[in-house]
Image: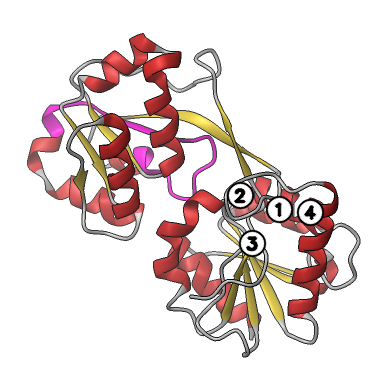
Amino acid sequence: MRDGIHPGYLGPDARKAPILIWTRAAADLPIDKYLLNALRVDVLHVPCIGVETLTPSQRSEGSFQKKSRIIFTSQNAVKICAAWRELDPAAFTTLASATSIFTHGRKTAELAEKLLDRPIQCIDSPTSEGLAAALLRDSSMSSTPMVWFCGEEVAFDLSSHLKSNGLNCERIPVYRTGAHPTDSTGQCLVGEALAAAREQLALRVKGCRIAICFASPSAVSGWLKFAGSHALLVPKAISAAVIGPTTARAATEAGFARVTACAWPQLADLAALGTQLAF
């Protein structure tokens, strides 16, 4: 993998066309790479969302109790919950009492073990869908309530999926994604930095057929901020693959040349659909 385009991810061969633009957050890239490296197109990662921590009063959809099993599917959620040690001691004490903690991403597991200072059970699956399948196969899961710490917008609703299959899983969003173009570290791009990144991407895609993938309405809004009025990056010049109907509405309203939703709201399907649209 080679750097050289905003904000730092290129597919295996930067000389070939067409091009797929991937807009998920910078923190998601370590998990997303397994999908992107396997695609038949160049992939340019342009994070279009930033992360905003939810305060205790903003958290929704229930509460968690001691001795629950905890699920993390993003590094963002791990970082936020680890910060509770100082910012929300009572919540951190309850978190620390968890019977066990699960994730499916190796990088997420490593971060959780480092920040939470306890063992993490990392399921051997590249996706949240695979994690859910593994939890459903384990008969011991039915005896203890589970809590999934996640973002407000998710590509796959793990909690609802587990509940529909008989497991007690509470979904608690601890962060939201805002429509903010960022660099590869997650820092918001503004002013001259944003203008430079925009021009660099436009130069890279000039003369190439391109498609773009969106996993949330926030990413659509973030792309509009990133693209500005540049003729090569405005929606009418690009086909969009989207994760579901809500994101499809946002992309349609934004004016993308073609908007196609995944048959199944999964990241693997989103990447595959984007590749199809790029050809």
Mark 4 and mark 1 lie on one chain; the one further toward the N terminus is 4
Q: Which residue is mark 1?
A: 220
Q: How is the image coloured?
A: secondary structure
Give the number of the mark in front: 3 or 2. 3
Say the numbered circle drawn on residue 216. 2
User: In the structure shown, which secondary structural element does the residue marked by tag 1 occupy?
Assistant: helix
Q: Which residue is mark 4?
A: 193
Where on the picture, by quarter, is residue 259? bottom right
Where on the picture, by quarter, is residue 90? top left
Q: Residue furthest top?
A: 90
Q: CA distance from mark 2 to mark 1?
A: 7 Å
Label 3–label 2 contact, CB within 8 A: no
Q: Amino acid at mark 4?
A: Ala
Q: CA distance from mark 1 to mark 3?
A: 17 Å
- The image shows residue 5 at horizontal and vertical percentages of 66, 70
Q: Which residue is mark 3?
A: 7
| Label 2: few (<14), some (14–19) or many (≥20) C-alpha neighbours in 10 Å | many
User: In the structure shown, which secondary structural element does the residue marked by tag 2 occupy?
Assistant: loop
Seen in the image, is 71 located left or right of residue 48?
left
Q: Residue furthest bottom?
A: 16
Task: Give, as a single range, the part of the protein colored magenta.
Answer: 142-160
Q: Nearer the viewer, residue 181 or 156?
A: 181
